[in-house]
Image (cartoon, grey):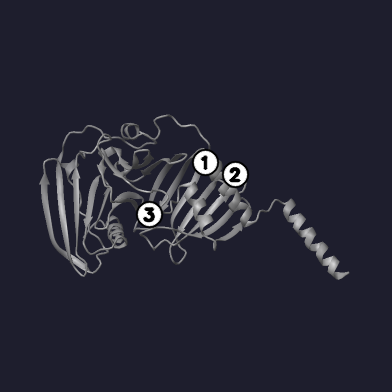
Amino acid sequence: MRKYFSLGIITLLVLVLAACGEKSKEDVVNKLQENVENMSGYQAQATMSLQTGEESQTFTIDIAHQKEDYYRVLLKNENDEEGSQIILRNDEGVFVLTPALNKSFKFQSEWPQNSSQPYLYQSLVNDVISDSESSFNTTENHYVFETKTNYQNNNNLPYQELYFDKKSYAPVMVKVLDKDKNPLVEVDFSQFELDPEFAEDTFEIENNMTSSLFGIPVMAEEEETESNQDFSVLYPTEKMGAELAESKEVNLENGKRVTLTYEGERHFTLVQERVDAYPTTAASPKTVAEAEPVSIDGTMGALTDKSLEWTMDGVNYYLASEELTKEEMLEVAGSVEAQAAK
């Protein structure tokens, strides 16, 4: 009798839970995967906060995706309008555009499939599916996963917490965590729409370089002035055992260039340059076929085995080394952004 009574209680509990609409981890994963497979695309808006440097940074993000491989991510830096960028993927390749500086890079890259992307829906879902050891729990309004990340050249952000809406399964919030589970990157989604309609030129490079989108400024004609060409030289705090051996400054026809040479355990050179406008345009972007697009505290750069190039506050930075690894170059670059004086 006790056996039948116990079985009856268990059955009743299962029915009660089912009636309450509680989903298992497998149910939620399957629904997320179904959403990604069946959608024609999505549009989303979010705010990304970074705590990876001495000062926090905030980016406003607008994401447009159309199946299969069309992406446009607008990254507006609230403290650096000139550094606001667009990541674009279309049939011609992957591009990183900085319209205010008339600057564009072209990559032959697998982005975004080759790394975790905290603001892309299908990347978040893929991380959930790929991590069989992920944890799962629920709140009143959210399904919450903690998964491993897949950042190819950054081991400092190994985990993430992902929050999905219980009704729509849309992304709500992402927290990217360091090794001690402290959140260093947070993405908060304010809007998410499945299967939107996009204008025909949404994913065309010419349109994105010449149109002011989401408050991202385009190149404007300015008179050359000393203030436009001048800038404060930045020095890295992470020097990989090297020390500053030489500093050279050269005045260019339309700007200024400073070259810092570091020698020691790891040799490297850091070039900083500000010009009125870069010669690359939508019609002829700088092609970096052997490079990959990487994020440096929210700013997109071009990383190769021996170099890293990125732009901040209207200044172009070029880091070159025969001895630093890719991960070490990213560490040096991240410390440059955080340090405004020698």
Residue drawn at the location 75% of the way across and 58% of the way down? 14
Pointer 2 and pointer 1: residues touching (CB < 8 Å)?
A: yes
Give the residue type at disc 2: Ser
Labels 2, 3: front one: 2
For the residue pair 162 and 327, the one nearer the viewer reads as: 327
Spot occupied by residue 165 in the image (x, y as percentages of width and height): 58, 48
Horizontally, residue 250 falls left or right of residue 188, namely: left
Residue position marked by numbered label 2 in the rendering: 168
Horizontally, residue 335 falls left or right of residue 164, namely: left
Task: Give me the C-alpha separation between circle 2 and circle 3.
Answer: 31 Å
Q: Assign the C terminus to one quadrant of the image.
A: bottom left
| Pointer 2 local density, CA inside 10 Å: few below 14, some 14–19, many at least 20 | few
Residue drawn at the location 50% of the way across and 39% of the way down? 42
Above or below: residue 238 compared with residue 142: below
User: Visible in this render: residue 142?
Assistant: no
Horizontally, residue 342 falls left or right of residue 303, namely: left
- Quadrant for residue 38, please give it: top right
| Pointer 1 local density, CA inside 10 Å: few below 14, some 14–19, many at least 20 | some
Residue position marked by numbered label 1 in the rendering: 192
Residue position marked by numbered label 3 in the rendering: 56
Could you tell which of marks 2 and 1 lies nearer the N-terminus? 2
Labels 3, 1: front one: 1
Secondary element at tag 3:
loop
Give the residue type at disc 1: Phe
Spot occupied by residue 117 in the image (x, y as percentages of width and height): 43, 51
Secondary element at tag 2:
loop
